[in-house]
Amino acid sequence: MRTIPSFVVTALAASMLCSAQTAPTRSIAAKRVNPAAPTIPKPVAGTPDIVFFNGVIYTGVGFAEDKPQIVEAIAIGGGKVLAIGKTEDIKRLAGPKTALRDLHFANTSTFIFPGFNDAHTHLGSAGRTKLNVDLTGVKSLADMLAKIKSAADAAPTGHWLTGGNWDHTLWADKVLPTRQDLDKVTGDHLTFLDRIDGHIAIANSAALAAAGITGKTQPPQGGAIDLDASGEPTGIVRESAQDLVYKVIPPPTPEERRKGDELAIKDALTHGVTSVQDFSDWEDFLVFEQMEKEGKLHLRITEWLPFKDPLLDLIRMRNHHNMSDPMLHTGFLKGFMDGSLGSRTAAMKAPYADDPNNTGLPQYTQDQLNKMAVERAAAGFQLGFHAIGDRATSMALDAYAQPGISTAARNRIEHAQVVDPADIPRFKQLGVIASMQPSHLLTDMNWAVDRLGPKRAAYSYAWKAFLDAGVPLAFGTDYPVEPITPFRGLYVAVTRMNEAATKTYYPENKLTRGQALYAYTQGSAYAEFAEKHKGKLLPGYDADFILLDRDLYRVPAPAILHTKVIQTFVAGQDALATSGQ
């Protein structure tokens, strides 16, 4: 993961501020202002806490049409945008205590954009990976084992080794690890390490024994236990079968969970993400809640609840916290239709091209899914289904088509990576949002055609096909499956190329920069019913914005990958400085 420089210290930020009485005035070059931009809206009442002026400020208006509105100045007060417009007009709004910040456009490269809203994260998982065995990016089995051995040598006796994020598709032989591989380096430590997508994991022999898994163990519905030629477990467990091991792993201590969650939140803010739509444990939500009570939560979090949980428990969790809280509340119900392409557990209508006896692992029967979906929709829940394979997507759409499920509910399909072309119009007909993660393509394009064959691959990661069909897009990362930086996703969304720019993947589905930025800001806000106060820098909207070192609209596409976030503001406050992180 690219490392973003640490946040500018408060002293430096203070040196960039001047009093309202002495600040110089400088106008930005007229050529930077879009003459076709909409009329500047009227200010809302209030005295600004801070005014940014002489800048290039993208309000978010016009992103969808690729005709972005640019203004010179913005006034922020009480956590909201108060006014936007020309420098001389906005500076007149300043009071005696208003801080004025000259962006010095003529001499610097600082650009303001709306903050990113990551529509799909797993903060809790990300934090625990950071605190345990982090195998992100290991290039071979040997490298993986070396990292595990180092962790085992440093861990206290009897301590479980957990974490993971390994990806065997990065290895030359692309062969899954085995329990025997782990046994060589783990000593007396029970070990369970998930693949980067979280849909399969590898256990050592001691962990399998602790979970009671043998060659005769019957996996639960939607799961599988890999066996070797002699009928013994290889150590790989898939999908719901992972729960057999998870239930015997001691939970993290409250202190460990809090530390991990804080690290994940800091990662998001550092990369310009001001809101996340997250699926973590309920215990993580309670950590976020405690942080908010302490005044230390500076990332907006909408927390999803598990679709599979009993309905009364879901209602209780929804009622636990104020749903109108702008910083933290619960959101839709997250259900899993299938697994992943990398693990070959995504549910497909036809076998995998490189595994002809395998069509993946559906997690529900259609009847089960329909009944649960109708019941939960009737209780007022928005629904969101993880569906990566074309069969899984069809099942999710069939569930949403049931009587009693409203087309106005903004139900979602998360990932929608491989879709039958006949199903794309059904998204629009049923009012379903395609919540997608462009950065997955940077990883998957190396093997997706082999998995799918060229015919199905042509309708994979089909962002433009969805937009052309009138389907709303919401973008995210699936962090920590992919790094939380949004700039990798923006780059691949507009290029359909790998980071080295040496490989292209069905370029007819690439987007314009405005379409990609819209999906990552206003599209994500729409997906959580927040488009009237998030995603734009207009009077009355949340003052969630970022200062970048380059203009995402004008730099060459490869330069997007190297974007640096100078500051991240949430509710008008410098989020990292305020939190002390």
Image (spheres, rainbow, N blue to C red):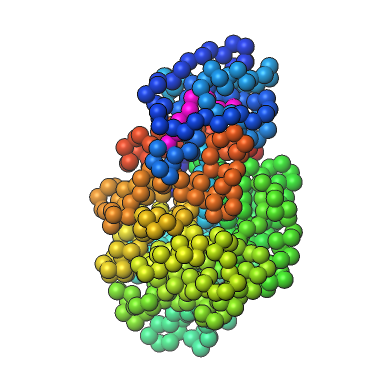
Residue that lies at the very extreme toward the top in this rendered image: 22
- Total number of numbered labels? 0
Residue 341 lies, in percent from the top left, at: 39, 68
Q: Residue at x 67, y 29 (%)?
A: 45
Whether residue 395 is visible, yes or no, is yes
Judge by depth and name the residue closer to the eye, 441 or 481: 441
Say above or below: 375 vs 73: below
Question: Bounds of the magenta span?
Answer: 68-76
The quadrant holding residue 252 is bottom right
**Is residue 472 depicted above or below 272 in this figure?**
below
- As drawn, is 450 to the left or to the right of 270? left
Residue 369 against residue 258 in the figure, above or below = below
Residue sitting nearer the eye, 568 or 228: 568
- On the question of residue 125 being in view, the answer is no
The residue at 40%/43% (across/down) is: 65
Give me the residue at 45% from left, 62% from top: 428
